[in-house]
Image: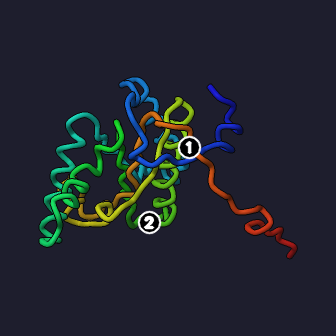
Amino acid sequence: MPDAIELLKARRSVKPMDLHSPGPSAAELETLLTVASRVPDHGKLAPWRFIVFEGDARSKAGEKIAEIFRSANPQATAEQIEFERNRLARAPLVIAVVSRAGPHVKIPEWEQLLSSGAAAMNLVIAANALGFAASWLTEWYAYDRKVLDALGLGPNEKIAGFVHVGTAATSPADRERPSLSAIVRRYEG
């Protein structure tokens, strides 16, 4: 397993269209989900859950996405509908991180939302640690209530992200990162 600091310093997202088989095995998927669930969680609420899309389930969910897109966009071309149909089929594995954040007597909703984001980031990091590439996306369908209903989300649930996982077709190029001097300030009172 790579050194954790070096892994974190080198982590990059890979576009889903550049993710190919093989994807994680059943045991590796269990590891990914275990790591994703080991995040800060004030009150032990588990304000997130996961939906796994692999194999034919990616196409079945894609049919629902395409149907909703077609209904909302009657002028859409066949190519546009096909693109929507393949949204979750671009990588061998897609995991939706579902936020179940809500009002609580002691735990602010904001903390619950952050916990969902931490779960998504842990998925990405764990995938990289296992030798896979990943991309955490939220595209239009992550915010469309009809899609959320079709994927089985409850009325109070939202998608924190779709984490696409697979083997990178090529080594991803790095992008320019902000200099620390632009984003760090020392508090001086």
Q: Residue 47, how many percent across, how many down?
A: 41, 53
**CA neighbours of label 1 inside 10 A, class few (<14), some (14 to 19), many (20+):** some
Find residue 172 and name its label: 1
Given residues 114 and 62, the one toward you in this image is: 62
Report the front residue among 129 and 172.
172
Residue 121, relative to residue 2: is it above or below? below
Give the farthest residue toward the right: 188
Q: Tell me: residue 133, above or below residue 107.
A: above
Rendered view: 70 above or below 11 = below
Residue marked by disc 2: 105
Q: Position of residue 173 (x, y in %)?
A: 59, 47
- Mark-to-mark CA distance, 2 and 1: 44 Å
Residue 114, image x and y in percent? 51, 59
Q: Residue at x 52, y 48 (%)?
A: 13
Residue at (42% x, 40% y) in the render: 19
Picture coordinates of residue 184, whole percent (x, y): 77, 66
Mark 1 residue element: loop
Residue, far bottom: 189
Chain-order first, disc 2 or disc 1? 2
The quadrant of the image that shows the C terminus is bottom right
> What's the residue type where badge 1 is placed?
Pro
For marks 2 and 1, give the one nearer the viewer: 1
Q: Amino acid at mark 2?
A: Val
- Picture quarter with the N terminus: top right
In the picture, measured across the screen, residue 174 lies left or right of residue 30, that is: right
